Image (tube, helix red, strand yellow):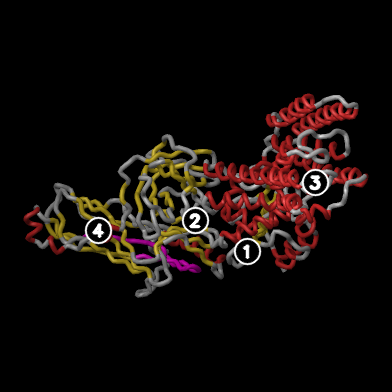
Amino acid sequence: MGTRRYNPLVAVILHALLLLSAVAVFLPAAQAQEAPEGSTNIAVQLVAPDVVVPGEETQVVLVMSPQTGWHGYWSNPGDAGVGMRLEWTAPAGLSPGEPRYPVPETLLISGLMNHVYEGRYGVVVPLKVAADAVPGATTLALEAEWLACTDTICVPERGAFSAPLTIAAGQEDALAAGRAANPDPGPWLAQLPAPLDAQAHYVVDGDTIRIGVPLPADLALSQPHLFLEQDKLTEYAAPQRYARVGDMLVITIARADSPRAIPSDGLRAVLRLDETGNGIAIVAKPGPVPEGGAPLSGEEPQRDLPALPWLLLAALAGGLILNVMPCVFPILSLKALSLARSGESPAKARAEGFAYTAGVVIACLALGGLMLALRAAGQEVGWAFQLQEPGVVAVLLVLAAALTANFLGLFEFAVPAFAGDGSKQGAFATGLLAAFVATPCTGPFMAGAMGAALLLPVTEAMAMFAALGLGIALPFLAVALIPALRGRLPRPGPWMVRFRRWMALPMGLTALALAWLAWRTGGLAFLAATLVAVVVALWLLGQIGRSQRSGRAAGSFAIAGLAAALLAAAFLTPLTSHEPAVQTEDTVLAARPFSESALKAARAAGKPVFVWMTADWCLTCKVNERVAIEREETRAAFEKAGVVVLRGDWTRRDPEITRYLTAQGAAGVPLYVWYPASGGEPEQLPQVLSPGMLAGRAD
């Protein structure tokens, strides 16, 4: 009984009918359009006891029987639909209470989450009999209104029901009147969620609500889902996250864009425990809720993932391709050529190869493990998250400028050694650096693999990150281990100096890109301060180079100076603007900022929608924008078709964008999703776009 997804043919009609249905249900009886006699799509039967006893409480049941293909709604219907409306006419002494519902199912249609029942179910209403109720025969009457829907159409329905019953004078009178023959509400009571016998708590944390539910750690959960009774508090379709902290289940849910105030009596909800419909009813009060915990697998229906060996192979291949990226290739090529220098022994080459590989793999494992840990702690982060932090960008800019200066011969690195005498320490440090700067380029080659890593168990996900690192390190490792490959490398000579100078070009371009990114993530003041740190670092490195060329030792001075510049860059974060330029960028397509509410509104309007997820540090994103997106041809085609363009900028960390990426099975950007006007299922487009692809889709 997990979430079902449909591809309705006429979502526009569905949304319009849902709105009309909601209005029609609550019109006065004279104005409501009732279904003709015998055409009810959800049959309703009022089941009441024959005899009741003063001073006791009993139950009446509304047995709801949807026809095949139809469904009814829970008390809180979700994004669309209407709950039941009950109006009782009860004699003096009889008091019907609030209806109690069984655990609902989730139904996702066109991005709208609904809480429904598709099979036969019972709504149980407690009936309190006053101690002074007058004995005798009487009648309990009910007028009910409900909404019956299929995947494409909704029909408001209503009915009048009555049940004769007798108020007995006492227990003996009840037995004499045949109380033993009363209908047994037991089967319907058994379907109700059991009340939790411990206190749950909640904490509002920014745009999320974290709820702690005391549950034994050994209680098995399968596809759990939390249904809040209060409406308009959360984003119903947003993924819910579950984690274990001992005997506490921690649930994190996204708040609505304009959430209503949480009632003073607490959050009332039903927690579905498994797909068979078992659940518990909870009331969460304000109180402490732990963060983090072990993520619970299976909280949402699992995606169909390729087998792990194929995912590992994809990660390995993606790592191999990363070696040709402009920020990695200069480092790799100079390290490889350093093995060709005269006198390099096979043993030393192997040692450097293993050290470089260890550095790359450890860096990938560290970044992947940190990402998983942050996500488990409730942080909305994805792959390449480090480039969303201005301080990290500043440090990388200083390093890129230093590497450019090194390639130009301004100074020689002691560690790592790019062209001088090799060392295991230098090779290890080079591997760390290569992996760290390579991760933003994984998008077009590793979208599926990195997206799968977010859904896999921790052990398998870490194996994916290790495979990525091995792919990055494999070319250098092969050269280090295979003498035949090493023998094919050009022999050392004056050309190596010229080649090294040429490698300063892609690394210098990388530094310029990082400077632009520093402005985009932190603002002009941050960029200016970072450039000051770069200038200071280059001046220090120039002084080190002069000492090296004159034969004086400069190792300690080099380490202290460069460390000071890096620390200065790292502590520039307080200068970061809270409103960087990324929020005001104009686009050829006149894109609107992405949000879940904007996506819902566009889909409800029946227009095609193009969701465009990008980031300033994503090279593939920028290439796609120049080649296929930001073109007059695309703009004209989109305007003609009425396409709504929603652009999500992930340059800085954005929890709502991260949630959307996760829901789409993507670990990072670029991501392009096309929503057809017909309301069909969204389609993920390729991460490398061709020039006419978008214009052709809009035609």
Closer to the observer: label 2 or label 3? 3
Magenta residues span 139-158
Q: Amino acid at mark 3?
A: Leu
Query: Counting residues from the N terminus, which is met first, the one under dot 2 or under dot 1?
Result: 2
Which disc number belongs to residue 339? 3
Mark 2 neighbour class, 10 Å CA radius: few under 14, some 14 to 19, many 20 or more:
some
Question: What secondary structure is marked by label 2?
Answer: loop
Q: CA distance from mark 2 to mark 4?
A: 29 Å
- The residue that appears at 32% across and 56% down in the rendered structure is 87
Provide the residue designation for mark 1. 683
Which quadrant would residue 428 be assigned to in this image? top right
Closest to the observer: 406 or 92? 406
Q: Are marks 2 and 3 in contact (CB under 8 Å)?
A: no
Provide the residue designation for mark 2. 79
- The residue that appears at 80% across and 44% down in the rendered structure is 344
Provide the residue designation for mark 4. 60
